[in-house]
Image (cartoon, grey):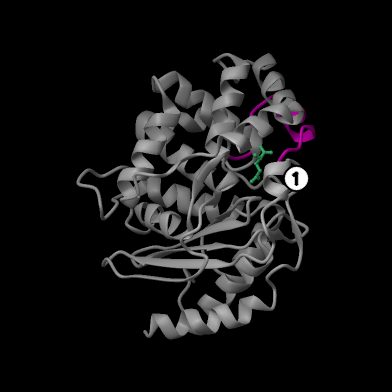
Amino acid sequence: MDYPELLEEIFHVARAFVGKGKVADYIPALARVPAEKFGIAISLLDGREYVMGDADESFSIQSVSKVFSLALALHHLGDQVWHRVGIEPSGNPFNSLVQLEYENGIPRNPFINAGALVVTDWLLGSSADPTTELLDWLRAATGNPHIGIDREVADSEWEHRHRNAALTHFMASCGNIRSNVDRVLRTYFEHCAIAMSCRDLARAGLVLAGHGKSPRLEERFLTRSQAKEINALMLTCGTYDAAGDFAFRVGLPGKSGVGGGILAVIPNLMSIAVWSPALDSHGNSMAGVEALERFTTLTGISVF
Ligand code: GLU
Protein backbone atom coordinates (compact mmCIF):
# COMPACT_ATOMS: atom_id res chain seq x y z
CA MET A 1 0.00 0.00 0.00
CA ASP A 2 1.42 3.39 -0.97
CA TYR A 3 0.11 5.35 2.00
CA PRO A 4 1.63 8.75 1.08
CA GLU A 5 -0.05 8.58 -2.33
CA LEU A 6 -3.30 7.46 -0.73
CA LEU A 7 -3.26 10.41 1.68
CA GLU A 8 -2.61 12.78 -1.25
CA GLU A 9 -5.67 11.48 -3.00
CA ILE A 10 -7.83 11.64 0.13
CA PHE A 11 -6.60 15.15 0.84
CA HIS A 12 -7.53 16.18 -2.68
CA VAL A 13 -11.06 14.74 -2.42
CA ALA A 14 -11.76 15.89 1.15
CA ARG A 15 -10.62 19.44 0.36
CA ALA A 16 -13.82 20.02 -1.58
CA PHE A 17 -15.72 19.51 1.70
CA VAL A 18 -13.45 21.52 3.96
CA GLY A 19 -15.30 24.53 5.34
CA LYS A 20 -18.68 23.15 4.26
CA GLY A 21 -20.97 22.74 7.23
CA LYS A 22 -20.84 24.71 10.44
CA VAL A 23 -18.18 25.09 13.12
CA ALA A 24 -19.56 24.38 16.63
CA ASP A 25 -20.54 27.69 18.19
CA TYR A 26 -22.09 26.77 21.54
CA ILE A 27 -18.99 28.18 23.22
CA PRO A 28 -16.83 31.05 21.88
CA ALA A 29 -13.55 29.14 22.17
CA LEU A 30 -14.76 26.58 19.63
CA ALA A 31 -16.56 29.08 17.37
CA ARG A 32 -13.22 30.83 16.72
CA VAL A 33 -11.48 27.81 15.17
CA PRO A 34 -10.95 28.38 11.40
CA ALA A 35 -13.30 26.21 9.34
CA GLU A 36 -10.72 25.56 6.64
CA LYS A 37 -8.41 23.40 8.77
CA PHE A 38 -7.93 19.81 7.68
CA GLY A 39 -5.58 17.18 9.00
CA ILE A 40 -5.27 13.42 8.74
CA ALA A 41 -2.92 10.98 10.45
CA ILE A 42 -2.63 7.24 10.20
CA SER A 43 -0.68 5.24 12.71
CA LEU A 44 0.04 1.58 12.06
CA LEU A 45 0.67 -1.04 14.71
CA ASP A 46 4.01 -1.80 13.04
CA GLY A 47 5.21 1.74 13.86
CA ARG A 48 4.73 3.39 10.49
CA GLU A 49 2.98 6.73 10.53
CA TYR A 50 1.77 9.02 7.75
CA VAL A 51 0.30 12.49 8.10
CA MET A 52 -1.03 15.24 5.87
CA GLY A 53 -2.33 18.80 6.28
CA ASP A 54 -2.83 20.20 9.78
CA ALA A 55 -2.12 16.85 11.41
CA ASP A 56 0.17 18.29 14.09
CA GLU A 57 -2.10 21.09 15.21
CA SER A 58 -3.88 20.55 18.52
CA PHE A 59 -7.65 20.88 18.69
CA SER A 60 -10.35 20.28 21.25
CA ILE A 61 -11.11 16.56 21.06
CA GLN A 62 -14.50 17.01 22.78
CA SER A 63 -16.52 13.81 22.62
CA VAL A 64 -13.65 11.74 21.24
CA SER A 65 -12.47 11.87 24.87
CA LYS A 66 -15.45 9.66 25.79
CA VAL A 67 -13.53 6.73 24.27
CA PHE A 68 -10.54 7.29 26.53
CA SER A 69 -12.59 7.96 29.67
CA LEU A 70 -14.48 4.72 29.05
CA ALA A 71 -11.21 2.85 28.48
CA LEU A 72 -9.85 4.14 31.80
CA ALA A 73 -13.07 3.18 33.61
CA LEU A 74 -12.99 -0.34 32.16
CA HIS A 75 -9.30 -0.59 33.03
CA HIS A 76 -10.09 0.17 36.69
CA LEU A 77 -13.50 -1.35 37.17
CA GLY A 78 -14.11 -3.96 34.49
CA ASP A 79 -17.63 -5.13 33.74
CA GLN A 80 -19.33 -3.41 36.65
CA VAL A 81 -19.25 -0.21 34.55
CA TRP A 82 -22.16 -1.70 32.59
CA HIS A 83 -24.39 -1.86 35.67
CA ARG A 84 -25.01 1.87 35.38
CA VAL A 85 -24.77 2.59 31.66
CA GLY A 86 -26.21 0.74 28.66
CA ILE A 87 -24.79 -0.43 25.35
CA GLU A 88 -27.53 0.44 22.85
CA PRO A 89 -27.68 3.29 20.34
CA SER A 90 -29.90 6.05 21.66
CA GLY A 91 -31.62 7.27 18.50
CA ASN A 92 -31.87 10.60 20.33
CA PRO A 93 -29.64 13.70 20.35
CA PHE A 94 -26.41 13.27 22.32
CA ASN A 95 -27.58 15.62 25.07
CA SER A 96 -31.23 14.49 25.25
CA LEU A 97 -33.04 14.54 28.58
CA VAL A 98 -36.25 12.83 27.52
CA GLN A 99 -35.04 9.24 27.15
CA LEU A 100 -33.21 9.42 30.44
CA GLU A 101 -36.43 10.06 32.31
CA TYR A 102 -38.24 7.16 30.65
CA GLU A 103 -35.31 4.89 31.42
CA ASN A 104 -34.90 5.80 35.08
CA GLY A 105 -31.60 7.64 34.81
CA ILE A 106 -29.67 4.81 33.12
CA PRO A 107 -28.09 6.28 29.97
CA ARG A 108 -28.35 4.27 26.76
CA ASN A 109 -24.61 4.16 26.11
CA PRO A 110 -21.32 5.72 27.27
CA PHE A 111 -20.95 7.94 24.19
CA ILE A 112 -23.96 10.17 24.77
CA ASN A 113 -23.37 12.92 27.32
CA ALA A 114 -25.39 11.25 30.09
CA GLY A 115 -23.41 8.03 29.63
CA ALA A 116 -20.07 9.82 29.70
CA LEU A 117 -21.16 11.66 32.85
CA VAL A 118 -21.83 8.30 34.54
CA VAL A 119 -18.46 7.02 33.33
CA THR A 120 -16.87 10.16 34.81
CA ASP A 121 -18.66 9.48 38.09
CA TRP A 122 -17.27 5.92 38.07
CA LEU A 123 -13.80 7.38 37.49
CA LEU A 124 -14.15 9.76 40.42
CA GLY A 125 -14.97 6.79 42.61
CA SER A 126 -11.99 4.73 41.45
CA SER A 127 -9.16 7.21 40.92
CA ALA A 128 -7.83 10.00 43.14
CA ASP A 129 -7.35 12.26 40.11
CA PRO A 130 -8.93 10.87 36.92
CA THR A 131 -7.93 13.83 34.73
CA THR A 132 -4.23 13.57 35.59
CA GLU A 133 -4.39 9.82 35.20
CA LEU A 134 -6.03 10.13 31.78
CA LEU A 135 -3.52 12.75 30.64
CA ASP A 136 -0.60 10.64 31.87
CA TRP A 137 -1.87 7.65 29.93
CA LEU A 138 -2.43 9.71 26.76
CA ARG A 139 1.05 11.24 27.05
CA ALA A 140 2.66 7.84 27.48
CA ALA A 141 0.64 6.16 24.72
CA THR A 142 1.45 8.94 22.22
CA GLY A 143 4.97 9.89 23.31
CA ASN A 144 3.78 13.51 23.51
CA PRO A 145 4.34 14.98 26.98
CA HIS A 146 2.60 18.23 25.99
CA ILE A 147 -0.95 16.90 25.76
CA GLY A 148 -3.07 18.93 28.18
CA ILE A 149 -6.35 20.63 28.90
CA ASP A 150 -7.44 23.76 27.05
CA ARG A 151 -8.53 25.70 30.15
CA GLU A 152 -10.44 28.29 28.17
CA VAL A 153 -12.60 25.57 26.63
CA ALA A 154 -13.08 23.80 29.98
CA ASP A 155 -14.12 27.03 31.72
CA SER A 156 -16.43 27.97 28.90
CA GLU A 157 -18.11 24.53 28.99
CA TRP A 158 -18.60 25.08 32.72
CA GLU A 159 -20.19 28.49 32.14
CA HIS A 160 -22.59 26.96 29.62
CA ARG A 161 -23.21 23.83 31.65
CA HIS A 162 -26.99 24.03 32.11
CA ARG A 163 -27.97 21.06 30.00
CA ASN A 164 -25.19 18.78 31.20
CA ALA A 165 -25.93 19.93 34.76
CA ALA A 166 -29.60 19.02 34.25
CA LEU A 167 -28.61 15.54 33.01
CA THR A 168 -26.28 15.00 35.96
CA HIS A 169 -28.71 16.26 38.60
CA PHE A 170 -31.47 14.13 37.12
CA MET A 171 -29.28 11.01 37.25
CA ALA A 172 -28.26 11.90 40.80
CA SER A 173 -31.95 12.00 41.71
CA CYS A 174 -32.21 8.44 40.35
CA GLY A 175 -29.19 7.34 42.39
CA ASN A 176 -26.98 6.92 39.29
CA ILE A 177 -24.48 9.65 40.21
CA ARG A 178 -22.59 9.15 43.45
CA SER A 179 -19.98 11.90 43.54
CA ASN A 180 -20.66 15.59 43.93
CA VAL A 181 -22.48 16.80 40.79
CA ASP A 182 -20.24 19.83 40.24
CA ARG A 183 -17.14 17.65 40.53
CA VAL A 184 -18.53 15.26 37.93
CA LEU A 185 -19.26 18.18 35.60
CA ARG A 186 -15.84 19.83 36.07
CA THR A 187 -14.07 16.55 35.39
CA TYR A 188 -16.25 15.73 32.37
CA PHE A 189 -15.56 19.19 30.89
CA GLU A 190 -11.83 18.77 31.45
CA HIS A 191 -11.92 15.58 29.44
CA CYS A 192 -13.91 17.27 26.63
CA ALA A 193 -11.32 20.08 26.65
CA ILE A 194 -8.28 17.84 26.14
CA ALA A 195 -6.28 19.27 23.24
CA MET A 196 -4.56 16.80 20.92
CA SER A 197 -3.46 16.65 17.29
CA CYS A 198 -4.47 14.07 14.69
CA ARG A 199 -1.05 12.46 15.11
CA ASP A 200 -1.62 12.16 18.87
CA LEU A 201 -5.13 10.78 18.44
CA ALA A 202 -4.07 8.20 15.88
CA ARG A 203 -1.29 7.02 18.20
CA ALA A 204 -3.61 6.85 21.20
CA GLY A 205 -6.19 4.94 19.16
CA LEU A 206 -3.70 2.12 18.57
CA VAL A 207 -4.72 0.65 21.92
CA LEU A 208 -8.02 -0.25 20.24
CA ALA A 209 -6.43 -1.48 16.99
CA GLY A 210 -4.06 -3.56 19.12
CA HIS A 211 -6.80 -5.33 21.11
CA GLY A 212 -6.04 -3.45 24.32
CA LYS A 213 -2.25 -3.23 24.04
CA SER A 214 -0.64 0.05 23.03
CA PRO A 215 2.55 -0.48 21.02
CA ARG A 216 4.39 2.24 22.98
CA LEU A 217 3.53 0.80 26.38
CA GLU A 218 4.82 -2.29 28.12
CA GLU A 219 1.68 -2.94 30.05
CA ARG A 220 -1.59 -4.05 28.50
CA PHE A 221 -4.26 -1.40 29.24
CA LEU A 222 -7.46 -3.25 28.32
CA THR A 223 -8.38 -6.89 27.96
CA ARG A 224 -9.04 -8.11 24.44
CA SER A 225 -12.75 -8.24 25.24
CA GLN A 226 -12.80 -4.70 26.57
CA ALA A 227 -11.12 -3.40 23.40
CA LYS A 228 -13.72 -5.30 21.36
CA GLU A 229 -16.52 -3.78 23.42
CA ILE A 230 -15.26 -0.24 22.90
CA ASN A 231 -14.80 -0.79 19.16
CA ALA A 232 -18.31 -2.23 18.90
CA LEU A 233 -19.79 0.75 20.73
CA MET A 234 -17.87 3.15 18.50
CA LEU A 235 -19.39 1.45 15.47
CA THR A 236 -22.95 1.48 16.81
CA CYS A 237 -22.99 4.68 18.89
CA GLY A 238 -19.85 6.69 18.10
CA THR A 239 -21.04 9.30 15.62
CA TYR A 240 -24.16 10.81 17.17
CA ASP A 241 -27.41 10.15 15.34
CA ALA A 242 -25.54 9.28 12.18
CA ALA A 243 -23.90 6.07 13.44
CA GLY A 244 -25.85 4.03 10.88
CA ASP A 245 -24.81 6.33 8.06
CA PHE A 246 -21.18 6.30 9.23
CA ALA A 247 -21.10 2.49 9.46
CA PHE A 248 -22.70 2.26 6.01
CA ARG A 249 -20.32 4.70 4.37
CA VAL A 250 -17.08 4.15 6.26
CA GLY A 251 -17.42 0.67 7.75
CA LEU A 252 -15.15 1.31 10.74
CA PRO A 253 -15.56 1.92 14.46
CA GLY A 254 -15.37 5.69 14.82
CA LYS A 255 -15.87 8.35 17.46
CA SER A 256 -16.43 11.97 16.57
CA GLY A 257 -16.48 15.19 18.57
CA VAL A 258 -17.91 18.63 17.93
CA GLY A 259 -14.36 20.00 17.72
CA GLY A 260 -14.30 18.34 14.28
CA GLY A 261 -12.11 15.37 15.14
CA ILE A 262 -12.91 11.74 14.34
CA LEU A 263 -10.95 8.73 15.54
CA ALA A 264 -11.41 5.53 13.51
CA VAL A 265 -9.98 2.09 14.19
CA ILE A 266 -9.00 -0.77 11.91
CA PRO A 267 -8.43 -3.68 14.31
CA ASN A 268 -5.10 -5.51 13.80
CA LEU A 269 -3.79 -2.79 11.53
CA MET A 270 -4.03 0.89 12.32
CA SER A 271 -5.82 3.85 13.74
CA ILE A 272 -6.80 6.90 11.68
CA ALA A 273 -7.53 10.40 12.97
CA VAL A 274 -9.04 13.22 10.93
CA TRP A 275 -9.82 16.78 11.86
CA SER A 276 -11.77 19.48 10.12
CA PRO A 277 -13.94 21.75 12.28
CA ALA A 278 -16.97 22.35 10.03
CA LEU A 279 -19.72 19.91 11.04
CA ASP A 280 -22.70 18.39 9.30
CA SER A 281 -26.18 18.60 10.80
CA HIS A 282 -25.46 15.59 13.05
CA GLY A 283 -22.31 17.10 14.56
CA ASN A 284 -19.78 15.07 12.57
CA SER A 285 -16.91 16.67 10.66
CA MET A 286 -18.04 16.96 7.07
CA ALA A 287 -14.62 16.68 5.44
CA GLY A 288 -13.57 14.14 8.09
CA VAL A 289 -16.33 11.65 7.26
CA GLU A 290 -15.65 12.16 3.58
CA ALA A 291 -11.94 11.45 4.07
CA LEU A 292 -12.63 8.26 6.02
CA GLU A 293 -15.15 7.05 3.47
CA ARG A 294 -12.60 7.64 0.75
CA PHE A 295 -9.95 5.80 2.77
CA THR A 296 -11.97 2.60 3.10
CA THR A 297 -13.26 2.79 -0.47
CA LEU A 298 -9.83 3.25 -2.03
CA THR A 299 -8.11 0.63 0.11
CA GLY A 300 -10.95 -1.87 0.33
CA ILE A 301 -10.11 -2.18 4.03
CA SER A 302 -12.90 -1.96 6.60
CA VAL A 303 -14.19 -4.24 9.33
CA PHE A 304 -16.59 -5.84 6.84
N1 GLU B 1 -18.58 19.28 25.55
C1 GLU B 1 -19.74 18.90 24.80
C2 GLU B 1 -20.95 18.80 25.68
O1 GLU B 1 -20.88 18.16 26.69
C3 GLU B 1 -19.49 17.60 24.09
C4 GLU B 1 -19.74 17.87 22.71
C5 GLU B 1 -19.44 16.72 21.78
O2 GLU B 1 -20.36 15.90 21.60
O3 GLU B 1 -18.35 16.65 21.22
O4 GLU B 1 -21.98 19.32 25.36
What residue lies at 59% left-to-right and 67% top-to-bottom? Answer: 38
Of the pair 180 and 232, the residue shown nearer to us: 180
What residue lies at 76% left-to-right and 63% top-to-bottom? Answer: 21
Across the whole image, how many numbered discs are drawn on residues? 1
Q: Residues within 10 Å of mark 1 (few under 14, many from 20)?
A: some
Of the pair 155 and 109, the residue shown nearer to us: 155
Q: Is residue 166 above or below residue 33?
A: above
In this orientation, does residue 301 appear? yes
Amino acid under disc 1 = Asn
Tell me the SS state at disc 1.
Answer: loop
Task: Choose top left, top right, bottom left or bottom right for residue 200.
Answer: bottom left
Residue on which disc 1 sits: 92
x then y, percent, for residue 262: 56, 58
Residue range (magenta): 92-109
In this orientation, does residue 85 appear? no
Prevailing SS of the magenta stretch: loop
What residue lies at 46% left-to-right and 48% top-to-bottom? Answer: 230
69 horizontally vs 284: left or right: left
x then y, percent, for residue 202: 42, 59
Q: Quadrant of ligand 1?
A: top right
Of the pair 64 and 304, the residue shown nearer to us: 64
Looking at the rendered image, the quarter that the N terminus falls into is: bottom left
Of the pair 273 and 25, the residue shown nearer to us: 25
x then y, percent, for residue 279: 71, 59
What residue lies at 47% left-to-right and 37% top-to-bottom? Answer: 69
